[in-house]
Amino acid sequence: MAISYRDQLKRKTISAEEAAAQVRSGDWVEYGFGLGQNDAFDRALAKRVAEFERVKVRGCLALKPRAAIEADPDSRHLHYFSWYFSGLERKMHDRGMCCHTPMNFGEAPDYYRRFVDVDVAVLQTAPMDEHGFFNFGPSVTYHKAISEKANVVIIETNPSMPYVYGVETGVHIDDVEFVIEGAASALPELGNPSTTETDQKVAALIVPEVKDGACVQIGIGAMPNAVCELLAQSPVKDLGVHTEMFVDSLVSLYEAGKVTGAHKKTDRYQMAYTFAAGSSRMYQFLDRNPACFAGPVDYTNLPQNIMQNDNVISICNAAQIDLSGQACSESAGIRQISGTGGQLQFVRGAYASRGGKSFMCLASTYERHGKRASRIVARIDESNIVTTPRTDIMYVVTEYGLVNLKGKSIPERARALISIAHPDFREDLERCARDYGLLGKAIF
């Protein structure tokens, strides 16, 4: 490590309390994304909450409780804004402590560079390397853009953070105002969702559609993970990975010898991703692993980049879909439960890829308050948010079948979707479809 970098680090290192003193009333304070959210600074800021007025804290996919927000449950002094809700942020939203900001995830770096104000940014990274860089670890996303835009950049180091290879993976000591040298603390883990019989049935319908040399994107949730698990047991070979989120099942797929990336056009022989959240096993796998390539989210998620690879397979979840093909994946009525994320962009990128396919997966039913209901509906629930328009939907999959909506009329779509709904709801769906004039003339 060059002596000048060590000197700069020593000169710029401050305590968490000193860092929290940089915040002023009215500031936008950036907490960043996922594993890159700070800890010591958050606790120090919590102690000062009563001193502030109108402080706005912005973050995304928080994986730990946010002490500063919990210290002000009535949001009298500060408020939290999220691009995409984790389970914690959903609970914060339900308690009136958090607001959602809509975003196509792949546009996030441009949002910061063009539209978003950042007064103080505090990002958790790996310790400074011998070249003076603080590595963002598996939360590359839009952190480089944050560091460019913020008036004050504060880095909080964590020796437990994996060091990842790729582009825009870190910020240099020259571009940092202050550093909090944190102690090693375990990274938050997301449990691998256990798969149900329904998940496995959906996966069994998708896997035959994945050919040798395909380039896969695996979304969050049990169904996409079930597809990965089944692919690991299948005869398919030479898969590539170009995804948004790196999940545990991709490690299993790689270790099963199914991933080579030999047919990729971009980042050949490497698994490209923009963030990861999962187990400590996965974090260890990503650490200094040249088989993995971390890039900013506008690299991984913009359709014009996704389509560069042939035979892209995009696998995403929906919570509800209507008989015309509109997919709702982020809300339950007016209640925000997650966000748009990269779903729409991967659906479009996969379709634009030569030989590409996108799959929208959902269980045919769900149960709430002891009552079972169909996820395929004649009309989407009032005020529900459409994440992927009907014009973009390709394959829709439930445990009862797989249908392709591309090129199909409204009557054809309605009949196709009714055919993969739960049998207990098909008659009612057909009756509603007729009442709404969705089935056209008898010729259909």
Image: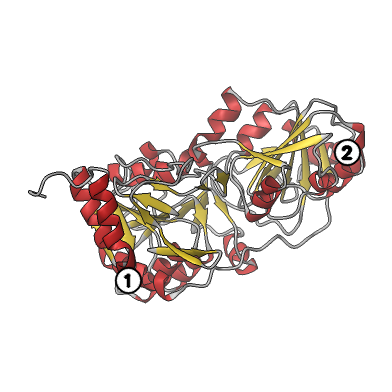
Tell me the kind of residue under disc 2: Val
Residue 426 location, quadrant: bottom left
Residue at point 66%, 27% (across, down): 149
Residue furthest to the left: 443
- The residues tagged by marks 2 and 1 sit, at their Cα atoms, a distance apart of 51 Å
Tell me the kind of residue under disc 1: Ala
Residue closer to the observer: 385 or 16: 385
First in sequence, mark 2 or 1: give its number.
2
Above or below, 100 against 150 in this view is: below
- The percent position of residue 373, horizontal first and vertical second, equals 43, 61
Circle number at residue 171: none
Residue at point 60%, 67% (across, down): 191
Residue closer to the observer: 425 or 44: 425
Q: Which colour scheme is used?
A: secondary structure
Residue at the disc numbered 2: 49
Residue at point 35%, 43% (across, down): 349
Residue at point 38%, 69% (across, down): 258
- The percent position of residue 285, horizontal first and vertical second, equals 57, 65
- The percent position of residue 270, horizontal first and vertical second, equals 44, 55
Secondary structure at badge 1 equals: helix
Residue at the disc numbered 1: 204
